[in-house]
Amino acid sequence: MSRTVRWGVLATGGIAAAFTADLLTMPDAEVVAVASRTDTSAKAFAERFAIPRAYGSWAGLVADDEVDVVYVATPHSAHREAATLALEAGKHVLCEKAFTLNESEALDLVKLARDRGLFLMEAMWTYCNPVIRRMTELVRDGAIGEIRTVQADFGFTGDFGAGHRLRDPALGGGALLDLGVYPVSFAQLLLGEPDRVQADALLSPEGVDLNTGMLLGWDSGATALLACSIVGHHPTAATVIGTAGRIDFPDSFFYPQRFVLHRADREPEEITSGPGPQGLSGMQFEAAEVMRAIRAGETESPLVPLDGSLAVMRTLDAVRERIGVRYPADAL
C-alpha cells in the first residue's frame, strides 16, 4: 500500500466530525468518502470537510474502490451491521466503542475479520494515547509495585429525556456502553479480564442504567472500583494504587495530557505528553495506529487487541446481567 491511507467515514454525527477533523491534519491520511443513511446528511458532511464523495447509503461507501479503511461512527446498535457490511466488502475497519452491544455481536465481527484476513480494531483511543502508553510502561517496569486497586469514573448530566438515544434500550442506551466502557477498559488494560464482577445501578423507566457502580475482582487480590453516570457530574478521574506508589489522573483520564506519579521517598512527578498539535481531539493517535498496522500488513493492533475488546464486552455483559439491563439485541 502507498504511504497515504484512504479513509471512508460511515456516519455523520459529532464523533465522526471530530475524527475527520483530526484525520485532515495528518499528511499520510486522506478522507475520500462519507456515508449516511440520507443523501442530505452525507452531502452536508462532505461539504463541511471538503470530502470528494458522499453516499446516501452505507453500501455505496463500502463499494468504493478507493476506500482502504472504513471508520464506523454509528451508535453502538448499528456497529455490527455497519462493520459487517464493510468487512464483507473487503475493507479494513475501525469501529467505535463500545465495540458492539454485546459479546455475541463482537465475536461475529472478530471471526469475520479473521476469516477474511482484514484489519479490525475497536476505536479505544485511550489505549493509543501517549500518556496512557507511558503509564503502562511505568506500571510494567514496577514503578508503583504490584497493583492493588484501580479507581475510575466517568459521568455527566444533560437533557436526556425519554426520547433521547441514551434512554432507548434498542440503541444500547444508558451510561454503561457510552461512558462505563472507559473505566472498564482502563482497569482491564492494567489488570486483564476480572475473575469476579459485582454491580448496582439506578435504572430509568425504560430499563437502561442511569447511574452504575462496579466492583471488579481478580484472583491476585486486585480490585477495581468503577462508576459511570448520565445523571451526575463526575471528575472523570482515575487512580492506580500499587504496593510501592500510585498514579493519579486528576481529570480526563480517557484522553489525558498528564498524570502524577507518587513513589515512596520521592517528590511527586508530573508526566505530560507535551503541548501536541493544537486543535486536535486526540483521535489522531488511534488513526496513526490503524494506518501503521495496515501498512505493516497486520490484521490486529497490539495496542488495542481484539481479544482485549472481547474481554471488555464480556465484562460489560456481566455488569448488565447484575443490574438487570437487557437490550432487544440480546435475544437475537
Image (cartoon, helix red, strand yellow):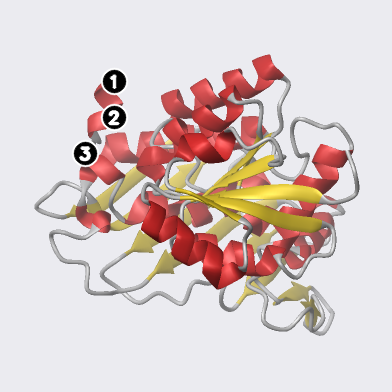
Going by the picture, which residue comes out furthest to the left?
A: 205
Vertical position of residue 236 compared to residue 30: above or below: below
Q: Nearer the viewer, residue 110 or 35?
A: 35
Going by the picture, which residue comes out furthest to the top?
A: 115
- What is the x, y in percent for residue 162? 13, 60
The residue that disc 2 covers is 329
- What is the x, y in percent for residue 202? 20, 56
Residue 285 shows in the view: yes
- What is the x, y in percent for residue 176? 37, 51
In the image, taking residue 157 as reference, residue 43 lies left or right, namely right
Q: Which residue is at a point 84% across and 80% down the rendered structure image?
A: 266
- Dot 3 or dot 1, earlier in sequence: 3
- Crowding at mark 3 (Cα within 10 Å: few <14, some 14-19, many 20+): some
Q: Which residue is at a point 38% across and 34% down the rendered structure image?
A: 317
> How far apart are labels 3 and 2 at the CA level?
15 Å
The residue that disc 3 covers is 324
- Crowding at mark 2 (Cα within 10 Å: few <14, some 14-19, many 20+): some
Q: Amino acid at mark 3?
A: Gly
The residue that disc 1 covers is 332
- What is the x, y in percent for residue 154? 44, 66
Give yes or no for contact between labels 1 and 2 (Cβ–Cβ under 8 Å): yes
Q: Count the marks: how many? A: 3
Q: Where is the N terminus found, in terms of image quarters?
A: top right
Q: Amino acid at mark 1?
A: Leu
Q: Secondary structure at mark 2?
A: helix
Q: Amino acid at mark 2?
A: Ala
Residue 128 shows in the view: no
